Image (cartoon, helix red, strand yellow):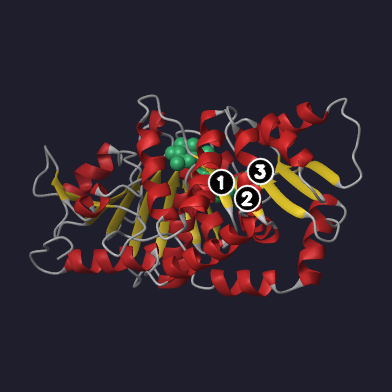
Amino acid sequence: MRGRERWDVFCRVVDNYGDAAVAWRLARGLSRGHGKAVRLYLDDLTVLARLRPETDAAAASQEIDGVQVCRWDPAEGFVLPADGIADVTVETFGCDTPMPYVETMAATSPLPRWINLEYLSAEDWVEGSHGLPSPHPRFAPLTRHFFFPGFTSRTGGLLREPDLLARRDAFQADAAAQAAFWRALAGGAPPAGALKASLFGYAGAPFAALLDALARHAGPVWVVAPEGAASAALEAWRHGRPARGDFTALAVPFVDQDRYDELLWACDLNFVRGEDSFVRAQWAARPFAWHIYPTGDGAHWVKLAAFLARYTAGMDRGHAAALTAMWEGWNRGEAVGRAWPAFAAGLPVFAAHAEAWAARLAAQSELVSQLVGFAERLARPAPRGLE
Ligand code: TRH
């Protein structure tokens, strides 16, 4: 590890997969794409094991894809690594870097760089907060900087592996690869011309109403739901219903994270949620509907509206309204059946839009490169944030 710049990434799983999913992508991108020596401290390896099945959830330390993955149990106290702290420390989503580590940072000269990777939001204020410093209340001049992902050039961008879009294009142009993918996942291929949809959402989503609408859709439909809230709802919905020849609704196993991309690429319409699958659906360049992570204070409605405003800007009013009605119905748990016909009729337009949107986002530098550049700027004498 010596010689390479050392990065430590801290992550606590609050719930579900998104925290670990984002931290893992970041750690792998730093190692693979930028040659950094990366340790990922994660408090719940069982989550990473779902995304990367080769993970040993009981191991204190293991190497996966060039990243040193270390189990970190905040309740057990933090043991400082024998070879010291890193040159750059990233905490994800305000997860609180452990105090012994912070104390060591404060006593190190020159002061190590310390960055908090924030949640993704399309809200305007993100541009003004991206890169801001926050001196530590006890250990100033030790300073933490806030790094915000986002959709505009004045934010930190989105996670995107350098070869992602080339792999997507190759897969989407390769009928045999898609057929092999479906055979492996579902034991068979969708009928020709089927509307193929993937389902991933939180337990409150109106899955049954959506499935009712899909079952009434003209033409063949092929819906798959990886194991979770969506697959449970799908099984319950299907129970006791007669099979219909050109309508297939399948509960499939939870796939590993790289294969999940292929699922999104193989479908014509993806229902996604949270943060990471939301971004991956955009890179899939296919129409999608987002189930936003609901927060108790209702802040998610503002976040949803901010994204919808960006996403539908430039779309004609009728299609923007149809897409908005579907997304809002999907998130409010109502009116999905009413919203579906106009949304379904708009799918060809949404498909062209999704391609243009992905191409526009791809013109932005991806998040890991931006983060590395940001850390380099912080290393210069008298760093002044993002100027
Ligand atoms: O799992 P999520 O709901 O994650 C979250 C958390 O709720 C977190 O607390 C919240 O803060 C954050 O979102 C915004 O949804 P997300 O972010 O989409 O992460 C899901 C990951 O799981 C993503 O990397 C895709 C992956 N996945 C698979 O690897 N295989 C699968 O079969 C499926 C359905 C998903």
Task: State which mark lies toward you, 2 or 3.
Answer: 3
Q: Write down which quadrant ligand 1 falls in.
A: top right
Q: Is residue 46 above or below residue 240?
A: below
Q: Secondary structure at mark 3?
A: helix
Asked whether 55 or 205 is in front, the reply is 205
Mark 1 and mark 3 in contact (Cβ < 8 Å)? Answer: no
Looking at the rendered structure, the kind of residue marked 1 is Ala
Badge 3 density bin: few <14, some 14–19, many ≥20, Cα 10 Å: some
Q: Amino acid at mark 2?
A: Asn
> Which is more N-terminal, label 2 or label 1?
2
Label placed on residue 341: 3
Residue ID at (32%, 63%): 371
Of pointers 3 and 1, the one earlier in the residue sequence: 1
Question: Cβ–Cβ below 8 Å for labels 1 and 2?
Answer: yes
Mark linked to residue 289? 1
Left or right of 240, for residue 267: left
Q: Residues within 10 Å of mark 2 (few under 14, many from 20)?
A: many
Q: Is residue 99 visible?
A: yes
SS label for mark 2: strand
Q: Amino acid at mark 3?
A: Pro
